[in-house]
Image: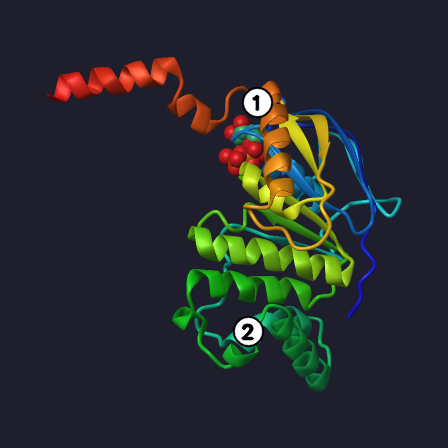
Amino acid sequence: MVIPGVHIKIENLAHRYRARSALVLDRAEAEVAPGEALAILGRSGCGKSTLLHILAGLMRPSAGAVYLDGKAVEGPSPRWVMMFQQPSLFPWMQVAQNVGIGLRFARLPKVEVASRVAEALRLVDLESHAEANVQDLSGGQQQRVALARSLVMKPELLLLDEPFSALDAFTRAALQRDVRSIVKRLGLTLVIVTHDIDEAALMADRALIMAGPPGTIVEAVTIDIKGQRERKDPEVRAARERLMKSFEAVAGPSPGAVESSPAAVAAVAALAVAQA
Ligand SMILES: Nc1ncnc2c1ncn2[C@@H]1O[C@H](COP(=O)(O)OP(=O)(O)OP(=O)(O)O)[C@@H](O)[C@H]1O
Ligand SMILES: [Mg+2]
């Protein structure tokens, strides 16, 4: 299964949720190459999810446009799929039924549904769980089912909105590695929204740093690392440092830095004294 990734052009996007409310996106511009893995990094509330919803055609921007392979996005399409933090599976259905639901809605013949579901489950390493009930699976396995349900549609673009943030560190690391390797093997374009700098360093070919509100894209950091990526690799560490620098320059000190800032240290010390 090889899927040609889609080219994305984001042109001068602006968005406000209500006519009189403040802008949440303003002049956001970017371009993504076919097959590129792109991370969008930014602080909470800067407009990342809003941007992703517009990319997916789930929302129309107030101004500007998104073009996929040169065609303006006007609504959702099976050519691009979005995955959220919660897998939102049907708990009363087995794994294979959950994965095949989109194909059954599209009225594909049963044999084709079965073979595509089997292929998608193989990709996410869940073949042996095809007949399991989803509520018997771990959170990480459920997120893999959601990934298989997305991949089975043979999308050209996978849009992820902090999909691993509810998982423990080990499960998250495994999924980050596997999603990158699957996306690269299939050739599809990936856009992942995150405020986790490690996630961007481990998964992306390039990260766009967003400032806001109102959200706008202010910097791009290339992460050119060949082959498998591990957190402890010097190249991954170096990428993390570069991302951290850009992120802090754009969005202020990172949460870790805030915790050890002089003001925070003084506040913790004061609290300790008060409790003593
Ligand atoms: N449905 C909505 N109606 C009105 N305002 C909204 C809506 N969704 C988001 N907003 C506002 O738009 C701004 C950007 O929100 P958005 O969810 O895009 O941020 P985000 O970068 O994804 O944040 P987080 O990292 O916390 O998920 C915020 O100020 C938010 O309050
Ligand atoms: Mg969000």
Residue sitting at x 80%, y 55%? 5
Residue flagged by tag 2: what amino acid is it? Leu
Q: Which mark is residue 248?
A: 1
Q: Most extreme residue toward the left, as rendered? A: 276
Q: Most extreme residue toward the bottom, as rendered? A: 111
Q: Give percent across and percent down for residue 2.
A: 80, 66
Residue sitting at x 37%, y 14%? 262
**Residue picked out by circle 2:** 126
Q: Which mark is residue 222?
A: none
Closer to the camera, 20 or 200? 200
| Quadrant showing the N terminus | bottom right
Closer to the camera, 239 or 134? 239
For label 2, count other residues whose C-alpha is less than 10 Å away and answer few (under 14), some (14-19) or many (20+): some
Mark 1 element type: helix
Tell which quarter ligand 1 is in: top right
Q: Relative to 222, does residue 108 appear above or below in the rendering?
A: below
Q: Is mark 2 within 8 Å of ligand 2?
A: no
Q: Relative to 243, does residue 130 appear above or below in the rendering?
A: below
In this picture, residue 272 sits left or right of residue 230: left
In this picture, residue 235 sits left or right of residue 167: right
Q: Give percent across and percent down for residue 142.
A: 48, 64
Q: Is mark 1 within 8 Å of ligand 1?
A: no
Residue sitting at x 66%, y 82%? 114
Q: Relative to 182, does residue 21 appear above or below in the rendering?
A: above
Residue sitting at x 67%, y 59%? 181
Q: Give percent across and percent down for residue 227.
A: 70, 54
For label 1, count other residues whose C-alpha is less than 10 Å away and answer few (under 14), some (14-19) or many (20+): some
CA distance separating discs 2 and 1: 39 Å
Circles 2 and 1: CB atoms closer than 8 Å: no
In this picture, residue 155 sits left or right of residue 241: right
